[in-house]
Image: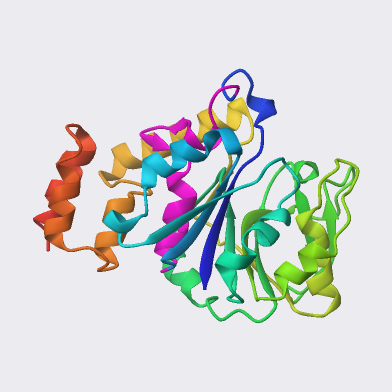
Amino acid sequence: MKGVILAGGAGTRLYPLTQIISKQLLPIYDKPLIHYPLATLMAAQIREILIITSPKDHSLFRELFGTGESLGVSIDYAIQDAPKGIPDAFIIAEQFLAGDSVCLVLGDNIFFGPGLGRQLVQYHNVQGAQIFGYHVSDPERYGIATVNSIGEVTDLSEKPKKPDSNIAITGLYFFDNSVTEFSKHLSPGKRGETEIIDILRAYHAKQSLQLEILPRGSAWLDTGTFESMNDASNFVRVLEERQGLKMACLEEIAWRNNWITTIDLVNLASKYSNPLGDYLRILAKTK
C-alpha cells in the first residue's frame, strides 16, 4: 500500500491568498494544511508517499519535507502541469505505484476521529475500492452516495441540485491496482477535467465499491473556501487547547509508530523554539 497526496490545482477560489503560494502551504492554525493529509497517511501506517504539486510550488513542498527520512517515511514528488481532475493523479503516480494498491487523500482535506488511523490499516489489502461517507447538511456541494437499508451503495451523483442523500463522499480513497487503468480511459467532463466519481461508478458497476460512513465523533473538514479554512483553524485551536494534545503532529505519529527513536524526537524538538518544541520534549519524557 502506497499513499498519494494530491496538492496541485490553481486554488482560484481562494485568490488573492493563493496567487503566489499553494493552498496546501497556508496555515491551518499552527501548521501548514498539507500536514493534515500527510498525518492521515502516516496514522494509517503508510510509509511510501507521493506528493503531487503544481509546477510553481514543487520546490516549496520539497523544502518543507525533503525525503521524509526524519519522519521515518519516504516522500517522493511529482508535478501536475495543469488541473486535470483527481483521476489524473493515478496516471501521474503510475511509476511510483508500480502495481501496488493506493490510498489517495486530497491535500485540502482534514480528518479527525478516535482510532481513525488504526481503522484505516485494515484497507491496506483492499480489493476494489473503499470510500468514506460523512453526513452533511449541504449535500448539493459534494459528490453524494445513496445507500440502501444495509449500507450498500445504490447510486452516486456529483453535486446534485436535489440530492436524495446527505452522505458526502470524502476526499479519502483506497483503490486496488486497477485504478490507473480505469483513469486512463476516462473522458473529461464539462469542466475539462476527469472526475473521481466516474472511477467510483466503474468500480460500482463491477460490484467492488465499498462505503463506510465515518462514525459520530469524527470530523471531516474540506478547506475549499475562506470560511471553511477559518473554521478548520478554529477547530484545531480549540481541540489542542482543550486537550493539551497536538493534532496532526507528524513527529509524534512517527515516534508512536516506532519509525523514529526518542533521541530522534528530541533532535526534532530542537528545531522549534515554540510550543511545538516544548510538546515534543514532554512527549520524549513519557516513554
In percent of width and height, residue 280 lies at 19, 48
Q: x, y percentage for residue 174? A: 61, 68
| Residue farthest to the left, as pictured | 285
Q: Residue drawn at (81%, 46%), measured in percent from left and top?
A: 193
- Nearest the viewer among 187 and 200 is 187
Q: Nearer the viewer, residue 194 or 153?
A: 194
Q: In the rendered view, would you say 275 is above or below 43?
A: above
Left or right, residue 182 beside residue 23: right
In the image, what residue occupies the spot 83% across and 50% down?
158
Vertical arrangement, residue 19 with respect to residue 195, above or below:
above
Look at the image and give the residue range highlighted in magenta: 19-45
Quadrant location, the C terminus: bottom left
* Residue 123 % position (x, y): 55, 76
Colour pattern of the rendering: rainbow
Residue at (13% x, 51% y) in the render: 266
Viewer-side residue, 134 vs 174: 174
Q: Is residue 233 visible?
A: yes
Answer whether residue 13 is magenta in the image. Answer: no
Against 200, is 87 above or below?
Answer: above
Q: Does residue 36 show up magenta in the picture?
A: yes
